[in-house]
Structure formats: C-alpha cells, structure tokens
Image: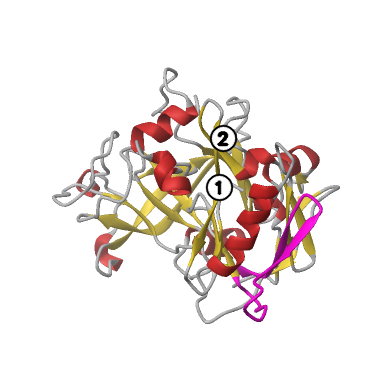
Amino acid sequence: MLHPYFLVASILSNYFIGLLATTASNNGGFTVELIHPYSPKSPFYNANITFSGHLNKYYPNAIQSQVTALNTQHLMKVSIGTPPVDIYGIVDTSSDIVWTQCVTCDGCYKQINPMFDPHKSPTYNASIAQGALAKEKVTMISTFGQTVSLDIAFGCGHNNAETFNDHEMGLIGLGGGFVSFVSQIGSIFGSNKFSQCLLPYDIDPSISSKISFSNGSEVIGDGVVSTPLVAKEDKTPYFVTLEGISVGDTYVPFNSSRKLSKGNMLLDSGTPPTIVLFDFYDPLAAKVTKTNLDEPILTVHFEGANVQLMPIHTFVPLKDGVYCFAMQESNGDVGIYGNYA
C-alpha cells in the first residue's frame, strides 16, 4: 500500500536534512547503513583511487558521455542463508524484486565477492518457488547493533545481463509492489513506511547514508517538507509532481510546451542522475550556463515542497576544475529524480 505522503526531504535534501532532522523514536522499526562502494566502510574500498578516479575507471569517456558516467549507487548489506553470506545489493525504489546472483551461474556478470549457493543453505526453501523465486532467511544489523532476521522471498539469478559492476551483487527493491523488500518486511513490522538520508559522495567518508524502515522511520525536525505521492496503475514506482526548478532567483516552470501533469517525476534511488523531459531540460540548462554565479543553487519545486540543492548535489567533479551538470534530458513521458540530487 502506498502512503499518501512520502517524506521527500528524507531523500531529496540529503546532507542538510541529515543535519537538521532526526527520525522519530524507534517503535518497532529499524535503521541500517547504506554504503557507497567507494566508502571506507565498503569491502570494495580502494584508498588510492579518488571519487573522480572511480568514474574514469568505469567510464573512461566520462566527459563525453556527461552524467551517464555516474557510478554512484547506494548498497545495502544483508546476509542471506545459513550460514549467512553477505550480499551488497543496490537499493532501488523503482523496483520490487529482491535478487542476487546464485551458484550455478553460467550467464552472470563478474562479481568480486562469492555468490550465494542455495545448495549449501538448509534454510533455503524452494518449495514455494515460482520461477527463480524462493524463501530464505535474511539477517541485517541495525545502526544500534540490533540483529534483525526474517524470511523473505527473493530471486536467485542464474543468467544475468552485464549491466552491473563487479561490486554490485544484486538488487533490493523498495517499490510499492507486494513482493518488494519494503512490503515484505512491512507485513512483519506492521508498516510499509521507510525513509532514506542519502549523503553526497565526496563529504566526510566516516559519515554513512542511512535507511529506516517501518515505525519510527518518520523524518521530523525543522526544514522537513513533504509532497503527495501520485497513485498510478503501476504500483511499483513512487510518482511525485514537479512544478519547476529555480536557478538562483530565476524560475524555470516545468515544461513550457506541455500541460503540467500530476505525477510527472518518479523517485529512483537506483538511478544516479536526475532526468527531465527534453523541452524542460533545454531552458533549464541554458539558465545554468548563463548564470553569473560560480556555484549556482538550484531549488526544485515539487507540489507543496521546495527543496534546495547546493552545488554538491548538482555538479559532479570529474577531474580538477572540471564539473558535470548532474541532470540529463529524456524523450520519455516522465522524469526521474535520481540519487545524486
């Protein structure tokens, strides 16, 4: 079930809301860390490579390919099976399925950590399987050191396209569908609510992004804003309404050539850049280019909520003195509010 209001500030205002707001007192829910692959807390961390160096490693033509060069996913650690095998999955609000690569895997992409082998786990229950779905014990450690264990349905991938990096071991779907991670644990904890605080990637690496589930995940405090979710036939993504974006004091209304529609943006924590429709992107990019400010502040105007984005949220450092505007255009019907903003 989708909640009528999603605490957009918990995703959108990132660093500053993380400073100003706190989650409500724990009342049956729990909070876990979200790990960037290039954080010192990640098992894939390499102290000798900078953030921009990672971009160039995976995308050597980063400048030419603009923000498609972003390799900025947030990983959530869960342990699957008995004995537990650590899985670092991408958190994705536009997907429902929870899956990881499993042995045997003839058509899988390369991953650094060992794959989950269901044949070695006595708690693996394939009797309820439909296709590659099965039930298995999943264990998480909260930020307070609490161990949370529960049985969830997840997918074992045996033939996967090479669209992931070697440190991405699967997906943790947070969408509104009934098989998503949020929906499954919500039936246990009594609430499908969740909130995220996603920090910029090049701040203090000792500070982690976090995600809170169920009761106690509400974000409270000065500066918190909310915007209505827009119900659509597709229950998986979370749709919101973008009214415009201000560059400094100059307002660019959403889409001069089309009628403003409800639910014209979806929130996608699994997509790094923010993607807007081309006939809105062009005037927006023109305003950003023409501004006299070295570091323009953008304000995203959602229905009933204004979210201020500092340069750290809107410009990607590719190398010394070279920055890329972290938005791109699309010919699609809806835009995407990505995790970098």
Query: In screen coordinates, is 166 left or right of 89?
Result: left
Magenta part of the protein: which range? 239-264
- Is residue 74 something that shows in the picture? yes
Look at label 2 and name its amino acid: Tyr
Percent position of residue 24, x then y: 76, 49
Name the residue carrying label 2.
201
Among numbered discs 1 and 2, the one appearing first in the sequence: 2
Marks 1,2: beta carbons within 8 A: no
Q: Residue at x 53, y 25 (%)?
A: 320
Percent position of residue 87, x then y: 38, 41
Query: In screen coordinates, is 302 left or right of 65?
Result: right
Quarter residue 266 falls in: bottom right
Mark 1, Cα crowd under 10 Å, few <14 / some 14-19 / many 20+, is many
Residue 326 - label: 1
Q: Residue furthest right?
A: 222
- Identify which residue, 39 or 287, lies in the foreground: 287
Q: Residue at x 67, y 40 (%)?
A: 311
Mark 2, Cα crowd under 10 Å, few <14 / some 14-19 / many 20+, is many
Residue 253 painted magenta: yes
Per the image, label 1 sits on a secondary structure element best described as loop
124 relative to 20, above or below: below
Look at label 1 and name its amino acid: Ala
